[in-house]
Each structure stands twice: as structure tokens, then as C-alpha cells.
Image: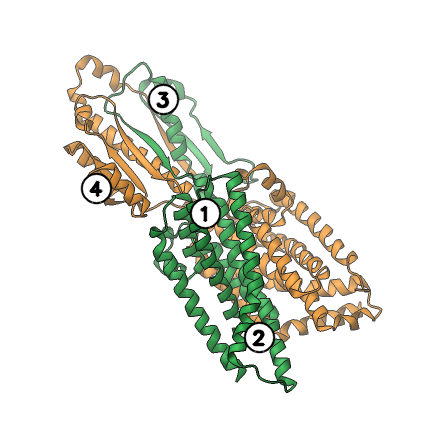
Amino acid sequence: MRKGELDLAVVFRKTFRRVLCMGEVAVQLLSNSSDPNRGSISTTCGSYHRQISAGANRLRQIPFQIQTENRMIYNPADEIILHVRAWHHGTGADDYLYHHDISLHSYLKRRRDHGGLLASPLKQGTMIFAKTIPYMIISFVDFLIILILITLSWVCLSTATAAVALLITLIYIILTLTYGLTVSTLVDKQVNAVIVSAITAMIPVLMLSGMIFPIDNMPRVLQAFSSIIPARWFIEAVRKVMIQGQGFLMIGKELFIMTGMTLFLLGITIAKTKKRLD
Amino acid sequence: MKTLKYLIEKEFKQMFRNPLIPRLIVLFPTMVLLVFPWAVSFEVKNIKIDVVDHSKSVYSKRLTDKIAASHYFNLNDTPPDYRTAMMNMESGETDMILEIPASFDRDVVKARTSGVGVAVNAVNGTQGLLGSNYIMQIANDFSSDLRDELMHTVPPQSRASLMRLPKVEIIPQYKFNSKLDYKNFMIPGFMVLLLTIICGILPALNTVMEKENGTINQINVTPISKINFILAKLIPYWVVGIVVMIISISVTFLIYGLWPAGSAIAVLFSAIVFIISVSGLGIIISNNSETMQQASFLVMFFILILVLLGGMFTPVSSMPAWAQLIASINPFNYLTETFRMLYLNGSTLADVSGNLFVLALIAIVLNSWAILGYKKRG
């Protein structure tokens, strides 16, 4: 087991058979519990044991037994591709934008240094907005590809579901692009922009957004932190719509929060950009 | 040899000229190890459950109380019918529904087998599985209680044979992680994650930055050999990686009290082999990119694949065949396994030598590629 070759050992006493017929007997399980979920095998073994002894006791009716009939609701297999999409949009959109905006700012700086006319803030805004459009298109194409993949492999999508998913994704794309804009106004070097985007976009989304680890299990502080991460709301909304098949009304809260975040980040970007020009 | 020394000096100077990088090296591992291990948990606790009780008898109420008292479950509501309960599940108010039929108390009293319906929200697959297992456990406990209490109502002839039901008791012994603490399992994984990110991204952006600045042309016209040039780029990142490892091991010990059950030297040694591989990959990406955008996309792409298919979050054995194939050439996978074995299992260097061999192989391949693939002509 230390060499990593063995996961479970079952120990039977020598007198197992004899003792079994008389009544009670104990069996020892040694499990490699470095992975607690695989290691807490007693549950699984317990139910195997019950099945076996139920088979052995077939001829005897055991009274006072409560049997549970289990039904799993919502196919969990659909999860996976949504995770990938959420992450991709989150980190991808941010990355795209950081780099390009750094070059925008250095370009503007060069123009200013060379004594060129200072562009009015409106023109500036239009230029920045124009910078984001190619990335929006790329993200949108991305979304279509993912939609096709989903339809091919897992879920049968109704038009209504796809439409709502489209809406959610559009809002999320705009949100992450705005986040990218904000970071690019706050960071000076392109290298640093990449590093900051990796740290603030990739790692928290991976850990805290409810993508892999359930949010309910986290301590309160981290749950609060999770609510700041845009990906969390995106994932919740998409799960409700695509896996649970709910409609537009149920995701109002998530959409509202995402829109609010977008406006907030936009405000920061505009404020910072104005400052830079002056 | 002297050339190499000067080149390394230059690289270090360039590295520290950017104020973010020293802070990154020290603060990032500390923050990650402080915060994120608390977030990771596949445990299933506080499952919200609705009980639809059609029987409303003494026995069904006892079962409901038993469930409410269990620390696995939070009793959310007792709606009057299944449809209301389903609406609760759809709105996310509850995760499970237990439906007790109207004939429950009659079945119990008449010593028959009674059935209850369990519906569980399996969006979180683990929660669904474990939740239904817990309910089964509680139901079984309850039925043994009932058996003890009501055995006297069973006619004497059948009673005798029932009393001698063979019972097998299972005694589990949880080795290597006796408290079943999921954090202990994930922390070695986090260390590998830190190494991958820091020693992957920084080298990847290194040469590209010089290309964009134009300073690469000056190096290219000198008679510096490829080996010297690339080695000088790699060695600072090996040092950075070792520093990150030392910080990680210390933080883990100070905060979580976790120290390798195997040897700490083995941990450092395997880390070094991995660092050599990952930084080699970074340099390859850097050599083949013209702009920083290109380089950062490529490096993010590789890091994503390395991490997700690296056995840190999901066990490799539950992956489909094609993913397992990728995992077999993924250095992340080998190092995570090695770290876990050294930290938790108490394996010795001999035990992990298989993994180390593969890691060394990958390191040699990647670094040769990095050195041979560099073209001075640009």
C-alpha cells in the first residue's frame, strides 16, 4: 500500500466461518484514505455486505426492514462541458483584452509624447470599445462551438434553452471583457498583465466558483468571496437553465448581479482612463 | 563557463527589475496555501432535505426526527405533497426529497417490509451518491431499532430463527489519512499547481519579452552558444522553483502541521526534476512565439491541460481512455502522485523511483528540444 499499488485490504479472521454461523463476527477493512472519498469505503462495503447477506438470507424474511428506492434527478454528466466553457470564457476573455489594451495605452502614450493632439475622452472610449469587438466575436464563435458540441454529445437542447443560454453567455462575455479592460487600465506592463490575469482569473475561478468544489462546503468567508467572482453567477445561471431546464424567470438574480458587476467595472475603467489622459 | 556565469547574472538582474516578480514568488504561494485548501472539499454535509410524509404516524415522525438530527442533513421543510417538494428542489431550496407512503405505519406494525421513495438532485454527482447512501444508512439504523423494539410482537416460532441472523460487523481502518481530512489530500496538489504556474508562465514570457523589446538581436550577434544561452535562461527559474518549494513546505507545516511522512529531501528532489521539465516547456513556448500574446495563450493552454488532466481534482482512474493517455505523459500527474505518496503514504525514495524516472525522461526531452530548437537567425 505504501508503494501505491494497493487501495484496500480486507482481513478475515481464521475462525470466520465458524463464528459466522453462531452470530456476530467482525471483518477488518484497511483502506488507503489519502483520498478521503475513495478511502471511506465503509459505506460502499457496507452496502455490498448487505446485498450479500440479503442474498444469503433469501429464504428468511427479515421483518422491520425499510427499503429505499432511489431516484437521481438531473443527469450529472452534463456538468462537465459547462465547467470548461465557464472557465474558458473567464480566463480567455480576460487574457485577450489585457494584452491588447496594454498596447493601446502604450500607443496613446507614444502619440501624446510626440506632441500629437490629445484625443477627446469620447473618441478614446470609442477606440477602446472598438478594441473589444474582435474578442467579442471570437468568444461568440466559441460559444457556438460549445453549443454544437453539447448538442452532439450530451443534451437535447430546446430552442428556448439555447436562447436563454445565449443571453447568459453574452452578458458574461461582456462582463469578463470589461474586467479585462479594468485590469489593463490598472497594470503598467504587459508581462504583469498576463501574470495578474492568471492569478485573479484562473485560480479563483477554478477553486471558488462552484465549478469543481461545491460552494456549500466552504467556510463562510470563502463563500462570501465566491459571490464576488463573476464566474460563480455564470455557472449557477447556466446550470439552472441547461441542466435543470428552468426558464428565464428563475435566473433573474444571477443576470442582475452580472449586469451590476459590469457597470461597476465600467465605471472604474472610465474613471481611470480619464485620469490617464490628464 | 564564465560566459554562463555572466549570462545568469544578467537574467537575474532582468528578473528583479520587475517589482512584481519577487513579490509574486513569495506572496503567491503563501496566499494560495493559506486560502484555497479551506475551499476544497468533496465532503457532503448539510444536505437540504424535504420530507413528504403521507403517513403522519408515530413511526414516520420518528424517522423524520432521526433525519433532522443527523449532521449530514438539514431538514428544510415538510411539504404536503411531492409536487411542492419538487418545486423546492427546482428553486434550489432543497437537494433531496424523502417520500413516506401512507401505509408506512401499517407496514411497520405488521412487520412487513416498507418502502420509502428518495429523490436526489444529482447535479453534483458525488452529493447525489453519498446523499442516497446516507439515507440508506439512516433507514437501516431505524429498522434495526424497530426490530429490537417490536420483536416481541412477532410470533414465537419465527422469532427463534430470526434471532440467529448472522451479522457481519465491518471495522474500517483508515490508513495514511486517519482523519479523512480532504485538505491533506489536496495540499500536495496545490504545491504542484504553484510550481506549474510560476515556473511555467515566467520562462514562457522571458524570451518573447526580449524579442518584443528588440534586445534579442544583440544576443544573437554574439558568439554565445545555444546551450549557454538557454541554460542561462533556465537556471534562474530552477532557483525560483526551489524557493517556491521551500516556502510552500514551510507554510504547509506552520499552518496545517503537515510534514512529509516520507523524507523531505525526496520531496525537494522530485520537485526539482519537475521544475526542470516545466521551465523547459516554458522556454520552448517562448522560442516559438513572436508576440507576448501568442506566448501567453500557448502557456495558458498547456497549463490548463496539465492541471485539469493531472489527477489533482479528479482521479485519473475515473477518466476516459483518451484522457488517461494524455495523463500518462503529463508531468503534473506524476509529481502530484509522488508528492501525495511522500507526504501522506510515507513512501520512501525507492517507492517513488518509478515516477521520478518518468519525470527525468520528460525533463530531458523538453530541455533538449528547448536548446536545439533555438534559432539565432530568428
Alpha carbon separation for disc pair 2 and 1: 40 Å
Q: Are marks 3 and 2 in contact (CB under 8 Å)?
A: no
Residue type indicated by callout 1: Ala
- A169 or B18: which is nearer to us? A169
Q: Which residue is mark 3?
A: A53
Q: Position of residue B56 (x, y in %)?
A: 16, 34
Question: SS class of the residue under badge 1?
Answer: helix
Labels 3, 2: front one: 2
Residue type indicated by callout 2: Asp
Alpha carbon separation for disc pair 3 and 1: 49 Å
Q: Which residue is mark 4?
A: B78
Residue B139 lies in what quarter of the image?
top left
Please state if A74 lies on the left or on the right of B15 as rendered.
left
Dot 4 falls on which chain? B
Give the residue displayed 43% in from the left and 65% down from the top. A262
Please state if B67 lies on the left or on the right of B131 as rendered.
left
Dot 3 falls on which chain? A
Residue type indicated by callout 4: Thr
Q: Which residue is mark 1?
A: A162
Residues marked 2 and 4, same chain: no
